[in-house]
Image: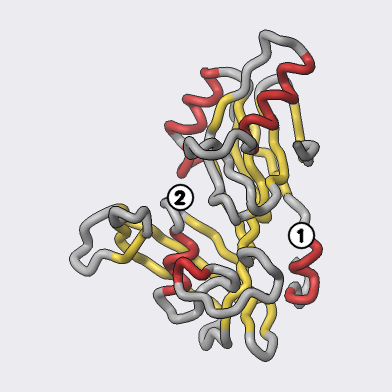
Amino acid sequence: MKKLDIIYEDKEILVVNKPAKILTVSDGTSASTLYSMARSYEKKKHKSNKIFIVHRLDKDTSGVVLFAKNEKIKKLLQDNWNDYANREYIAILEGNLKENSGVIKNYLLEDRTHKVYISQNKKGAYAETHYEVINRAKNTTTVRVLIKTGKKNQIRVAFASLNHPIIGDKKYGSKTNPIKRLGLHAYKLDVKVNNITHEFVAKLPKEFASFQGREI
């Protein structure tokens, strides 16, 4: 089992940099998850220590994940997540995105195969995705992404709807995979805990370096 990449820790929260290709929490088929790693870390300090899931990242997405160390903080954050948390991602898209910035608004549904798709009649969960281009290359566009809602596969579906899927995202139409993983990283989380706003940053994976462009 890999060692946790800890960004921040205090008596109430644990913040880690999740690697790609590991589940945040088990889907019933995998025993090794980010949650199991965090739980083992806490149990090694004291057998009565607990850890709680607050939010998740997709298996193939890397970046900032916050855990709560007690149920009070877990409930407080989960009940107010969209109000308390601002989430910034870095995404590498296929092709040359025409606009330099924009807002993608969708209503999302999920089919029986767990693939998320856009509703044509405004049924489903509302998703709002803001983006800004930070680098352009011959066959890719790198964007900074801010989400106002945290829906399953939201960012991946949003850019696929513009015909610029995230590289490595075969599920949503990507045909290229130059970095051998999904080109999506949860770069920064600003979150309010007990009326104090924290900023947590997960450094960009090394495979993102050639796509970074101007300083993030």
On screen, residue 87 versus residue 111, left or right, reads right
In this rendering, does residue 117 appear at all?
Answer: yes
Q: CA distance from mark 2 to mark 1?
A: 22 Å
* Kind of residue at badge 2: Gly
The residue under the point 45% across, 35% down is 80
Q: Are marks 2 and 1 in contact (CB under 8 Å)?
A: no
Q: Position of residue 143 (x, y in %)?
A: 61, 72
The residue under the point 53% across, 18% down is 71
Local SS, label 1: loop
| Mark toward the viewer: 2 or 1 | 1
Q: Position of residue 119 (x, y in %)?
A: 25, 64
Which residue is disc 2 drawn over? 150
The single residue placed furthest to the top in the displayed view is 48
Comes first in the chain, label 2 or label 1: 2
The residue under the point 69% across, 86% down is 137
Q: Residues within 10 Å of mark 1 (few under 14, many from 20)?
A: some
State whether residue 171 is above or below residue 152: below
Q: Nearer the viewer, residue 138 or 188?
A: 138
Q: Nearer the viewer, residue 179 or 68?
A: 179
State whether residue 152 is above or below residue 138: above
State whether residue 185 is above or below residue 210: above
Q: Quarter of the image containing the N terminus? A: top right
In this rendering, does residue 6 appear at all?
Answer: no
The single residue placed furthest to the bottom in the displayed view is 138
Which disc, if any, is residue 205?
A: 1
Q: Quarter of the image containing the C terminus? A: bottom right
